[in-house]
Image: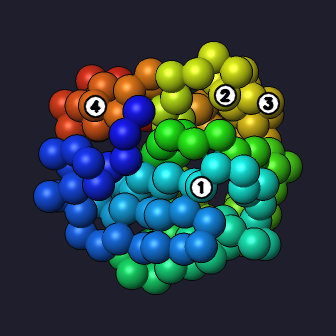
């Protein structure tokens, strides 16, 4: 898989946020994260910063956003940290995981135990984006 920067989508980016641990691309109605290889992604060191920056930029609590975790690199997520997200009164319209590796998809099953809504999984970014733009799948 390739980065958003190397796709047709990059022309649609409203704002790009670059962090030492990865990049986040803000679009109209959704955001895409690409976390660096080897990171242990958690609330305090990573997610809280992204959430505050994105939601401040867009002026939302997230209820109108779809978050796409574009897993082009191998990294770990602390699934329990979703509890911090929801306790802070943040929301998401949807949560998509894009990964072509079965092991990463299996890891997302554990993550779904702590996420309040259903997680949608895709093998490629194009299909995930198309489902948003065409309304092809039900969110929630």
Relative height, residue 104 to residue 7 (above, below): above
Q: Seen from this angle, which residue lies furthest top?
A: 102
The residue at which mark 4 appears reads as 126
Q: Which residue is mark 2?
A: 104
Residue topped by disc 1: 36
Residue plotted at (59% across, 73% down): 20
Q: CA distance from mark 3 to mark 4?
A: 25 Å
Q: Residue at x 74, y 29 (%)?
A: 107
The mark that comes first in sequence, 1 or 4, is 1
Mark 1 against mark 2, which lies toward the viewer? 1
Residue 124 on image: x %, y %: 38, 27
Of labels 3 and 1, the one closer to you: 1
- Earlier in the chain: of badge 3 and badge 1, it is 1
In contact (CB < 8 Å): disc 4 and disc 2: no
Nearest to N terminus: mark 4 or mark 2: 2
- Marks 1 and 2 in Cβ contact (< 8 Å): no
Q: Which mark is drawn over residue 110?
A: 3
Residue 73, picture quadrant: top right
Of tags 3 and 4, the one toward the viewer is: 4
Sooner in the amino-acid sequence: mark 1 or mark 2: 1
For marks 1 and 4, give the CA distance. Answer: 21 Å
| Badge 3 or badge 2: first in the primary sequence | 2
């Amino acid at each position: 898989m390739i980065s958003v920067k190397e796709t047709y989508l990059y022309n649609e980016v409203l704002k790009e946020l670059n962090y030492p641990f990865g990049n986040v691309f803000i679009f109209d109605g959704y955001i895409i994260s690409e976390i660096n290889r080897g990171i242990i992604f958690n609330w305090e060191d990573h997610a809280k910063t992204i959430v505050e920056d994105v939601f401040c930029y867009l002026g939302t609590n997230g209820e109108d956003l779809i978050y796409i975790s574009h897993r082009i690199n191998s990294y770990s997520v602390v699934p329990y940290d979703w509890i911090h997200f929801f306790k802070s009164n943040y929301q998401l319209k949807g949560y998509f995981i894009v990964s072509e590796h079965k092991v990463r998809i299996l890891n997302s099953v554990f993550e779904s135990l702590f996420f309040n809504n259903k997680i949608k999984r895709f093998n490629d970014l194009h299909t995930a984006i198309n489902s948003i733009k065409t309304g092809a799948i039900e969110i929630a």
